[in-house]
Image (cartoon, rainbow, N blue to C red):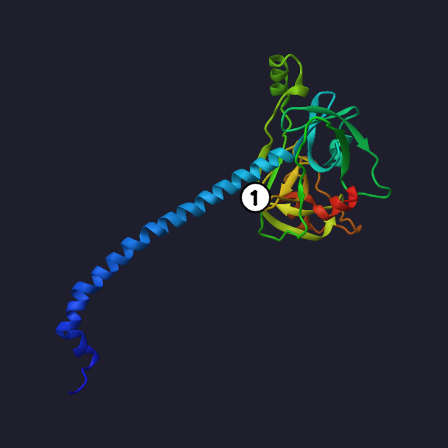
Amino acid sequence: MSKLTPSELLESPQWQYWIARVFPMLYITTLTLLLPKILTQSFVVSELGATQEQKLQQHLRSISIKILAHGETIGSGVLLAKQQHVYTVITNAHVIQSASVPFQLQTHDGQVYAAALITPPTGQNRDLSILRFQSPDRTYLTAKLATALPKTGDRVWSSGFPLVGVGEASAGRENRSNDTSTQIWEPNIVSGQIVQILPIPIAGGYSIGSDRSIEKGMSGGPMIDRSGKLIGINGVHAHPLWDSPEILEDGSTVSDVLQEQIKNSNWAIPIEFVKEYARL
């Protein structure tokens, strides 16, 4: 018997039966079995993403500190380390320099503690400061410090306490019996991407540039990665009212192109500089 050509095979009664009846039935059966699994799997992935987002935001709230001077909010900080009942908080030097002692620290549960300002290491020029407080009765989580370097394109989360406007602050004081130190404010949480990592930091130690705007008052707050680890301390927001830095840490002048990039990005001090400063 001679072999059928491909066109003759397709025209044969047997193949026409398979094409007309069996193939559609197999397709429908397969789709019926797989579609619920595909939809369920997609839903689970989405649900896991939402859960992870909530965990990251909760972690940010736990490690974020509001810094006060004379009962007024002056900036943000991060619970960096703990030794017995003593907690170390990192913030920006320019936050501390904007006010005078005494300083207080407010934790996520609304507790306010007296803060001791630690003398900076000799010869350091990074925009960092350390405060410490004691809490013998309450225990707080501290930041998980990153060991790997972040990369351009990584998603990051930041938090902090934007400064209240004069009018709003006045109304708040009237409604709260002039006791601003005991107000419990939720930190502002923003998410964005790293757009640039400078090989030579801007003066002050800033080298991580992100695309999501932080507000005035969020200086000193944490920047974490998707694993919840602290990768930097925020301190310079985009489009500042003052001039952007014109000098890099090595003393070289910032080019016009880089100057424009600096103005359009938000900047954080990387965790390796924080560890070095805090001697961790």
Farthest right residue?
122
What is the quadrant of the C terminus in the image? top right
Q: Is residue 100 left or right of residue 79?
A: right
Question: Front-most of 259 and 248?
Answer: 248
* Image location of residue 226, percent across then percent down: 57, 46
Could you classify mark 1 by the number of other residues whose Cα lies within 10 Å: few (under 14), some (14-19), or many (20 or more)?
Answer: some
For the residue marked with disc 1, what is the amino acid? Answer: Gly
Residue nearest the observer in this picture, 169 or 26? 26
Residue 65, how many percent across, how many down?
67, 31
Q: Residue 203 appears in which quarter of the rendering? A: top right
In the picture, measured across the screen, residue 10 lies left or right of residue 214, that is left
Across the whole image, how many numbered discs are drawn on residues?
Answer: 1
Residue 99 location (% of width, % of height): 76, 26
Q: Is residue 177 above or below residue 104?
A: above
- Relative depth, front residue between 231 and 63: 63
Task: Please identify the residue farthest to the left as the structure is shown.
Answer: 13
- 174 displayed left or right of 102: left
Residue that badge 1 annotates: 192
Whether residue 260 appears in this view of the structure is: no
State the image coordinates of residue 44 (x, y, percent, origin top left): 42, 46
Residue 55 visible to an observer of this rendering: yes
**At 19% across and 64% down in the image, what residue appears?**
22
Q: Residue at x 63, y 30 (%)?
A: 161
Q: Image height check: is 89 above or below 3? A: above
- What secondary structure is marked by label 1? strand
Q: Nearer the viewer, residue 101 or 141?
A: 141
Q: Is residue 205 above or below residue 109?
A: below
- Residue sitting farthest toward the bottom: 1
Q: Quadrant of the N terminus?
A: bottom left
Residue located at (70% from left, 23% from top): 112
Quarter holding residue 136:
top right
